């Protein structure tokens, strides 16, 4: 996005530890940093906490109960009154049920008894951070939807659309962009899933790079080597160590396309990466930390993958903390004029030709087509038509070859703006050939908005043959033949 100032990388708010014991602060801070919580602040004097919260954003507050000057219980009440959005974890050496109940009633997120096990402590902090992120995302999404404006519209300049469905997705992406949670993007082939993933990465202002890989067809060993890398001598031919894509995407985004084709054993490794934020290169027994955000995509419907047991339920639920479904092109026909104009300019520029003028019938013809290949298919159709073009108005011949029933076998025609199929039903008997013919002619004219040329293309007959059928029948053409 040239011409726009680059946003500064967003750092997650720090975790604040409050305790009058400096040794505990040191060990607790070290534990959190080792677990991947990069920013940790410590305070020994509880009287300094409220002024600090007033001037600095904090993700989680961890405080001791027994402190001089201002006790943990008093501080908890003050924090809940002035900063109700801030999750507070209480840690104390007192294993008293009444005290724990009192703290939870005051709004504490969790109550831990010292000495607390490291994994339990880290898990509690991470859960509190996730809850805080989700609350902020919901608040941000509500604000954007109510305002109706995008915060950074330039990020989505590569996704050409005036569709309300797509703008709803853009608002959602802005709300979740700075989250550290994984994202699952679903949608048909060619709908623009990678463009959506790149928009999320750009919005996040991450300092790292965007790394994309299609994992369809990778066996477990290739998957592990591609993502995690290997050490020297890990297998025959591994003459030197190599970092995987997760290391290349450090501090940025790793985009895994076609997640639905991933083998079960590889799904287990991906799940561990998402949950533990660590991985093992091939040939190594020393784990490495991962700080790249993972975005996955599939053209298959998630419920179908779950039903077929080709996608693990635990991985699916871990991925769908944020879920974006990109609508197919046939569900947003209002985007066709914008996309056609863009691809005409792009094709003319690449072929060094003058941009041709599209005939009015083109948009009617395209709006009656199902576009199984979505935006990518439209782009190829436009480029092919411009390559064949000589001068004057753009010919419809190349479009008709694709859209007509005699065209490619995966072409399908659906009503404009609707994914459902038309039907012919006559209760009590089988329809006659004449009734079926009348229905097909009527449906073709309906979908083509009474344009006989487009309707004839949909029916796979000439315009003259269609006109004869209209003259023989009761329906008269609205447009002259």
Image: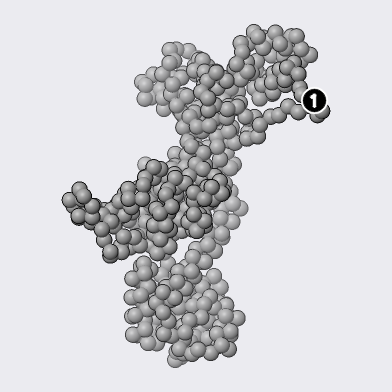
> Which residue: 56% across, 55% down?
141
Q: Quadrant of the C terminus?
A: top right
Q: Secondary structure at mark 1?
A: loop
Left or right: where 28 falls relative to 183:
left
Residue 255, given in percent of the width and then of the height, sits at 40, 48
> Which residue: 36% across, 81% down?
25
Q: Is residue 436 above or below residue 199?
A: above
Extreme-bottom residue of the structure: 68
Closer to us: 135 or 9? 135
Residue 337 visible from this viewpoint:
no
Residue 101 visible from this viewpoint:
yes
Q: Is residue 79 above or below residue 226?
A: below
> Which residue: 71% across, 29% down?
423
Which of the 4 image quadrants contains residue 388? top left
Q: Is residue 17 above or below residue 443?
A: below
Q: Which residue is mark 1?
A: 429
Left or right: where 432 falls relative to 16:
right
Extreme-right residue of the structure: 428
Which of the 4 image quadrants contains residue 271? bottom left
Residue 440, given in percent of the width and then of the height, sits at 69, 21
Q: Quadrant of the N terminus?
A: top left
Q: Residues within 10 Å of mark 1 (few under 14, many from 20)?
A: few
Left or right: where 272 falls relative to 128:
left
Colour scheme of the rendered structure = one colour
Closer to us: 384 or 313? 313
> Which residue: 66% across, 21% down?
444
Q: Is residue 122 above or below residue 373?
A: below
């Amino acid at each position: 996005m040239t011409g726009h100032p680059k946003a500064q990388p967003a750092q997650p708010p720090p975790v604040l530890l409050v305790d009058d014991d400096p040794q505990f602060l040191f060990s607790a801070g070290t534990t959190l940093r080792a677990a991947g919580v990069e920013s940790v602040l410590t305070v020994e004097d509880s009287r300094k906490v409220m002024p600090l919260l007033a001037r600095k954003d904090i993700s989680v507050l961890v405080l001791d109960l027994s402190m001089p000057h201002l006790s943990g219980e008093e501080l908890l009440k003050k924090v809940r009154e002035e900063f109700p959005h801030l999750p507070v974890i209480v840690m104390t050496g007192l294993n008293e049920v009444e005290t724990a109940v009192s703290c939870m009633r005051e709004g504490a997120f969790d109550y831990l008894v010292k000495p607390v096990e490291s994994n339990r402590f880290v898990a509690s902090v991470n859960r509190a951070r996730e809850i805080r992120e989700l609350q902020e995302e919901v608040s941000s999404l509500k604000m954007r939807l109510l305002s109706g404006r995008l915060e950074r519209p330039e990020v989505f300049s590569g996704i050409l659309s005036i569709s309300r469905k797509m703008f709803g997705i853009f608002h959602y992406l802005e709300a979740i962009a700075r989250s550290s949670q994984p994202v699952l993007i679903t949608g048909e082939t060619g709908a623009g899933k990678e463009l959506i993933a790149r928009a999320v990465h750009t919005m996040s202002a991450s300092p790292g790079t965007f790394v994309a890989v299609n994992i369809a067809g990778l066996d477990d060993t290739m998957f592990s080597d591609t993502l995690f890398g290997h050490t020297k001598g890990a297998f025959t031919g591994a003459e030197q160590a190599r970092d995987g894509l997760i290391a290349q995407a450090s501090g940025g985004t790793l985009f895994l396309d076609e997640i639905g084709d991933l083998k079960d054993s590889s799904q287990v490794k991906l799940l561990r990466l998402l949950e533990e934020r660590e991985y093992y290169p091939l040939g190594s027994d020393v784990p490495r930390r991962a700080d790249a955000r993972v975005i996955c995509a599939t053209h298959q419907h998630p419920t179908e993958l779950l039903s077929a047991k080709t996608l693990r339920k635990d991985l699916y639920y871990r991925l769908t903390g944020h879920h974006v479904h990109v609508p197919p092109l046939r569900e947003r026909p209002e985007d066709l004029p914008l996309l056609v104009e863009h691809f005409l300019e792009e094709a003319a520029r690449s072929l060094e030709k003058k941009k041709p003028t599209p005939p009015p019938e083109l948009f009617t013809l395209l709006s009656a087509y199902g576009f199984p290949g979505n935006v990518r298919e439209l782009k190829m159709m436009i480029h092919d038509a411009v390559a064949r073009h000589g001068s004057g108005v753009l010919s419809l011949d190349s479009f008709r070859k694709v859209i007509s029933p005699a065209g490619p076998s995966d072409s399908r025609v659906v009503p404009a703006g609707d994914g459902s199929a038309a039907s012919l039903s006559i209760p009590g008997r089988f329809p006659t050939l004449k009734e079926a013919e009348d229905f097909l002619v009527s449906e073709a004219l309906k979908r083509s908005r009474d344009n006989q040329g487009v309707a004839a293309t949909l029916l796979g007959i000439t315009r003259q043959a269609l006109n004869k059928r209209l003259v023989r029948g009761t329906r008269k053409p609205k447009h002259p033949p």
